[in-house]
């Protein structure tokens, strides 16, 4: 563990003492207070280190009405409450006698209660709901991204940085050096990196970090996206987590691996079962299957998301589960015992990780609470099945557009139940506006195909 990040397992007094020691030893002068809006877009306000005590006390106010999905203008005063465990020095800021640091924060109301419009607080409530049943939630996300070249003004082009393929090394993998610098920055900020490699598509990459508790994993995902973009920019590149930036090649996913633990043991593991899965694991899978259509507007939030969820590019678009079949929406990785987990393969990295992990956990928890039975697993290659065969097996499709996903979110109960009235209403409003903007715009495809012909 780097000396510039917080050690695990300490109480608040010990953490504060360690933070102050780091601030002194690393000559920290500026502290960035970070949080996310309803779409998971990172926001930040910077204060001087002299404001540290007030910051820790939650006295940093901001205008919630200026943040997407937050407060109306007549109730705009909100405060930032730093999570002390997220303190880290920014490695790219370190100079002789100077550095900067950051906290990730939750938004709170003037009376100190959690602000219901903050998506980080939404995940906290889901974590608490699981805890009431005796469970802790473990999450391991896998976020893919593309690297594009930039123009003279620093704006992204459509030119990919390399033409490498899956697991290809240099010289074809031109992103190797970029990933190395990203790895170094993440490690310095407390990440445990497990793997780094070129992905299937040209210009596509992945860096895997170790699983964490649900809130910690969402914080890591948010930080990861920020660091990837920041380091890529230093190489004159643009990193994007857009799900499908290039037609005809694979898009980027955010596979979410999730486990429930109880009394220190993996609640999804049962050595005596044929697949070594517990009844709780099967019910969790059943909850995901039952709610798959209703949660996809959260796990796949963009118009562009549904251009990834099509046959032929390894992205799951059929609702089924399997012990190992990567064409299924839900997969059970081979590692068992304490590593037993359920992998949902449809989410993409444009999603707000706080909402995504909350609604996946909520759907699975609902399956456990209701004692739902998982349907039969599908071990055939679903991608190459005939439509008749899929109908015979009862395999349904995920929604094929954001419009249909929004309708399914409204038709189900899981969205409102998990997100709460405020976030649910603001999220629906934002997604409907996004779809309507797309629907009414004239796109280049229409010009290319219709203008000269008609």
Image: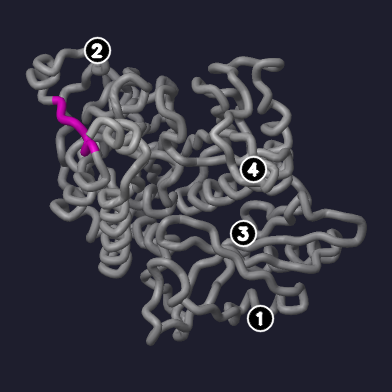
Secondary structure under tag 1 reads helix
- Report x, y in % for residue 262: 38, 45
Chain-order first, disc 3 or disc 4: 3
Q: Which of these two is toward me, 193 or 118?
A: 118
- Locate the N terminus by quadrant: top right
**What residue do we see at 40% from left, 23% from top?**
248
Looking at the image, which residue sits at the far right? Answer: 96
Q: Nearer the viewer, mark 3 or mark 1?
A: 1
Graded by Cα atoms within 10 Å as few (under 14), some (14 to 19) or many (20 or more), the crowding at tag 4 reads: many
Q: Which residue is mark 4?
A: 191
Placement of 258 over or under 97, stated as above or below: above
Magenta span has 397? yes
Q: Nearer the viewer, mark 4 or mark 2?
A: 2
Q: Are marks 4 and 1 in contact (CB under 8 Å)?
A: no
Q: Which residues are magenta?
A: 395-400
Chain-order first, disc 3 or disc 2: 3
User: Which label is found at residue 85?
Assistant: 3
User: Which label is found at residue 24?
Assistant: none
Q: Which residue is mark 2?
A: 384
């Amino acid at each position: 563990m780097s000396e510039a990040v917080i050690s695990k397992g300490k109480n608040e007094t010990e953490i504060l003492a360690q933070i102050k020691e780091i601030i002194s030893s690393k000559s920290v002068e500026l502290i960035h207070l970070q949080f996310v809006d309803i779409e998971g877009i990172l926001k930040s306000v910077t204060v001087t280190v002299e404001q540290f005590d007030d910051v820790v006390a939650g006295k940093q106010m901001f205008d919630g009405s200026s943040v997407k999905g937050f407060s109306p203008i007549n109730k705009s005063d909100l405060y930032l409450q730093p999570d002390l465990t997220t303190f880290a020095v920014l490695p790219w800021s370190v100079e002789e006698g100077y550095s900067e640091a950051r906290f990730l924060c939750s938004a709170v109301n003037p009376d100190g209660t959690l602000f219901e419009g903050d998506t980080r607080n939404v995940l906290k409530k889901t974590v608490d709901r699981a805890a009431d049943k005796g469970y802790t939630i473990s999450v391991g996300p896998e976020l893919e991204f593309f690297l594009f070249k930039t123009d003279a003004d620093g704006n992204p082009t459509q030119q990919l940085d390399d033409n490498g393929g899956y697991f290809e090394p240099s010289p074809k993998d031109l992103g190797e050096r970029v990933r190395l610098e990203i790895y170094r920055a993440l490690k310095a900020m407390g990440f445990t990196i497990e793997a780094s490699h070129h992905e299937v598509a040209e210009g596509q990459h992945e860096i895997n970090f170790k699983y964490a508790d649900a809130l910690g994993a969402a914080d890591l995902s948010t930080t990861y996206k920020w660091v990837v973009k920041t380091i890529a920019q230093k190489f004159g590149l643009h990193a994007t987590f857009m799900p499908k930036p290039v037609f005809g090649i694979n898009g980027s996913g955010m596979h979410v691996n999730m486990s429930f633990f109880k009394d220190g043991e993996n609640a999804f593991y049962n050595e005596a079962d044929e697949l070594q899965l517990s009844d709780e694991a099967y019910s969790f899978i059943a909850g995901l299957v039952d709610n798959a259509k209703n949660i996809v507007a959260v796990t796949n939030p963009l118009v562009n998301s549904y251009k990834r969820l099509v046959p032929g590019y390894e992205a799951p678009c059929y609702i089924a589960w399997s012990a190992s079949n990567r064409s299924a929406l839900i997969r059970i990785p081979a590692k068992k015992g304490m590593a037993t987990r359920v992998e949902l393969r449809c989410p993409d990295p444009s999603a707000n990780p706080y909402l995504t992990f909350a609604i996946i956990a909520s759907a699975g928890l609902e399956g456990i609470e209701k004692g739902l039975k998982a349907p039969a697993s599908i071990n055939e290659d679903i991608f190459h099945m005939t439509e008749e065969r899929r109908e015979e097996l009862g395999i349904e499709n995920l929604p094929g557009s954001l419009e249909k996903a929004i309708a399914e979110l409204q038709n189900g109960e899981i969205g409102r139940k998990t997100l709460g009235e405020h976030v649910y209403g603001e999220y629906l409003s934002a997604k409907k506006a996004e779809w309507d903007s797309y629907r009414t715009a004239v796109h280049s495809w229409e010009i290319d195909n219709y203008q000269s012909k008609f």
